[in-house]
Amino acid sequence: MSQPVTHRRVSRRASWTGRALLAPAVIAIVIIAIYPLGYIIAASFSESSLGRPFSEWVGFDNFAALLGDGITLPSLGRSLLFAIPSALIALIAGLAVALSLDAAVKGGRIIRVLLLLPLMTPPVMAGVIWKLMLAPTGGLLNNIGQSLDPGSEPFLFLGSSPAAMISVITVDAWQWTPFCVLLVFAALQTLPTEVYEASQVDGAGVWQTFWRITLPLVLPSLITVLLLKLVVSFKVFDLVFIMTSGGPGFDTTVSSYEIYRTGLQTFDVGAAAAQTIAFLVLVTIVILPLNAVRQRLHKES
């Protein structure tokens, strides 16, 4: 009789030990994720400000207001307009550079460190540097243009539409291309060499090898990188804040910047929370199908 009792005591002790080990992770998730999400959902159904949170429950009034304010929905569209091209440009450029590295450099530690330099640059610093380079007076690009055509007027890279959005997309893609390069390069290093040796024996050319072997094998990793870059692009705030402040007009006012303006400039926390929920829905609609494709490709590979 004593042996089963001892066994149960050991099992209970092991169970409580496991729970104790999991407790810090659970507490961290509650503090970092669940509590902020619950607070935002509750605030979106209330009239709240920084000084008077939850002063009155207004139901769906905040959501009805954002549908008709003429700012929130366009900002969601601009977030899509920013995130998708930025992610695709960074992914395509990263794939091209990674293929070149894979062909030319098998170790490539120094090259990889150099590639990391844009990624290690803080977004605020990158925004300041590029804002100076794109400035109409004294900017590097305008100086080059006027040296080639002395009579030309300076081009307003950040003060005209659609040049401002294109400029911010370009800077974001420039900064995050090294991230894509490293991930794609790591994926290329894991591809089986036997397949490439067989293709060389069969006389396959460079493009045939890429389209029929490399791309199908690396496609699941490319979708994963695209998924990660999309999430990062949707969250952009620093570059917009530093380079354009949402202008000219509202041309670069993406959702994250509009939420900041609503919550921290007009202090309408309830409306900002409703905008955050709408933004979360948009990101989910974009990310979930892509994640389903990624999972299917990984199962097939």
Image: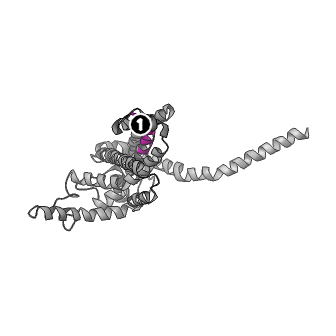
> Residue 23, how many percent across, how many down?
65, 51
Q: Is residue 38 above or below residue 200?
A: below
Residue numbers of the magenta segment: 212-225
Tell me: 116 left or right of 252: right
Instruction: Tell me what residue is drawn at x 61 percent, y 51 percent.
Output: 25
**Which corner quadrant of the image does residue 155 belong to?**
bottom left
The chief SS type of the magenta part is helix
Q: Residue furthest left?
A: 151
Q: Is residue 213 magenta?
A: yes
> Residue 234, how many percent across, how many down?
38, 48
What type is the residue that disc 1 sits on? Answer: Gln
Residue 125 at least partly seen: yes
- Mark 1 nearby-residue class (10 Å; few <14, some 14–19, many ≥20): few
Q: Quadrant of the N terminus?
A: top right
Q: Residue furthest right?
A: 1
Q: Check disc 1 and report the residue beneath it.
A: 200
Instruction: Tell me what residue is drawn at x 78 percent, y 43 percent.
Output: 11
Instruction: Tell me what residue is drawn at x 46 percent, y 58 percent.
Output: 109
Tell me: 159 left or right of 115: left
> Residue 93, how many percent across, how many down?
34, 48
Colour scheme used in the picture? one colour
**Which corner quadrant of the image does residue 121 belong to?**
bottom left
Q: Nearer the viewer, residue 247 or 295?
A: 295
Mark 1 secondary-structure assignment: helix
